[in-house]
Image (spheres, coloured by chain):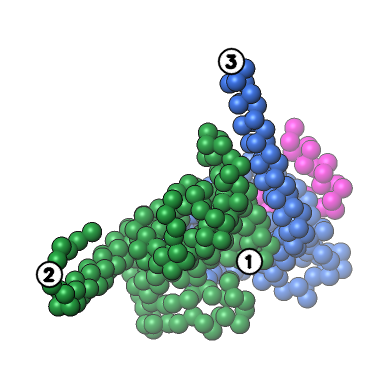
Amino acid sequence: MSEVGYARIAQDGFWKNNPALVQLLGLCPLLAVSATVVNGLGLGLATALVLAASNLTVSLIRNLVRQEIRIPVFVLIIASFVTAVELAMNAYFHDLYKILGIFIPLIVTNCAIIGRAESFASKHTAPKALADGLMMGLGFTLALVALGAMREAIGQGTLFAQAHLMFGEDARTMTITLVEDYRGFLLAVLPPGAFIGLGLLIALKNVLDDRLQRRRLRRHAVASIPRQVGA
Amino acid sequence: MNEVLRNMGVAAGLLMGFAIIGTGLVSVTYEGTRERIVANEKAALVRSLQELVPPDRYDNDPLRDRIQVTSGALGVTGPITVYRARRAGQPLALFTTVTAPDGYSGPIKLLVGVYSSGALAGVRVISHRETPGLGDRIELEKTDWIRQFDGRSIGSPYAPNWKVAKDGGYFDQLTGATITPRAIVRAIYQFLAYFRANHAKLFAPASETRQATAENAQ
């Protein structure tokens, strides 16, 4: 197993292998809850927390668990953490919990989590697995927030609506009204808006990647004798 | 054969170990958060009751003065808790949950407050799965639609007008969502009719009511 550096882990989680935009894992909560920034952030952070905890645990026990029962064990670990997070959210962010409702328990079925447990945490040391869990989780959160911002701005003409659910009463003023008396654009709020929004985000990411790649190649071509390009 | 059995035993033992650890984690969290969750739920309930009837109008604790009733008019088959507010022992208002079973995408749960006179103190949506942007405008956070029930009673508007405007009734519908308001109007009307017919029972002191519920069940 080749060693992976922390910079690489961060880069993978946020960009190159972003669970939402590249691996396309965990779409169920992603599409359902991303109608506003606050919802996206809430679910994203809950997922990140579960992902970090489960990655760490899976890595710690990786030499203890036999191959044939690793999947049930992973599922058990993930489900336990999700239940714990759900209870904690109900206790400390009661109103947000009421809005996110069923999607908190559904974190159990987020394939990104078991995916990371299987493909990364079970093969790497604990600190690396924890870092991977955090970075993948934050990458997922980032995608959720970006999609949430897009849908909220287009759908309702606001940003950070209902921020008080997460940050307390003082945060009521955080809500930014982009357009006064906005009539709303229903498509962005409804599920199809989530699909279209996600498609646009992926397209945007690909365009950016393409640009970067081309710039790199050009610099390469100028700097050295043309050589084999690719890989 | 023995080899297989031994492997199975070890795997099962490992799995059991993890099950115990996992359950332990969940139990500890549950114990640690239980009180706070109960307190949260109670606080949320108190807040919503106070929003319907100002707390200085009654002098008892409605959360304690409660009974269970079972009636089809409340939209569910199981028993429902009714909280009563009194002033100097006289019935002032009661609060309960009414479910409109026929929302656009499933039941809509409502918190209803009604004064002893039969006039609605107000209605709030507790939970629903209506279409975001259309049916969800029944939430007070989104629009004032639900406030049009404030002060209404079974005779005001006149019974045949307890419909949405589209059906020739008194109440506004929501653009693009007719089924949702229709379900709510119907559920509230049904509840008010039930309230009028069972006024004495609903406000009866807790011990008598248990009897009444038992009779009702027979």
Relative to A19, residue A208 above or below: below
Relative to B23, residue B132 above or below: below
* Depth order, front residue of B171/B125: B125
Instruction: Name the residue carrying label 1.
Output: A93
- Magenta segment: does it hold B208? yes
Letter of the chain that mark 2 sits on in the rendering: A
Instruction: Name the residue carrying label 2.
Output: A226
Does residue B203 appear to the left or right of B135 in the view shown? right
For the C terminus of chain A, the quadrant is bottom left
Characterize the local packing of mark 1: few (<14), some (14-19) or many (20 or more) Cα atoms within 10 angstroms.
some
Look at the image and tell me whether residue B94 can be seen.
Answer: no
Q: What residue type is labelled 2?
A: Pro
Q: Name, please, the residue furthest toward the front.
A: A225
Q: The green chain is which one?
A: A
Q: Do labels 1 and 3 share a chain?
A: no
Q: Which amino acid does label 1 sit on?
A: Phe
Q: Colour of chain B?
A: blue
Tell me residue A37's x, y (percent).
46, 71
Instruction: Name the residue carrying label 3.
Output: B1
Identify the residue at horizontal 52%, vertical 63% (top origin): A131
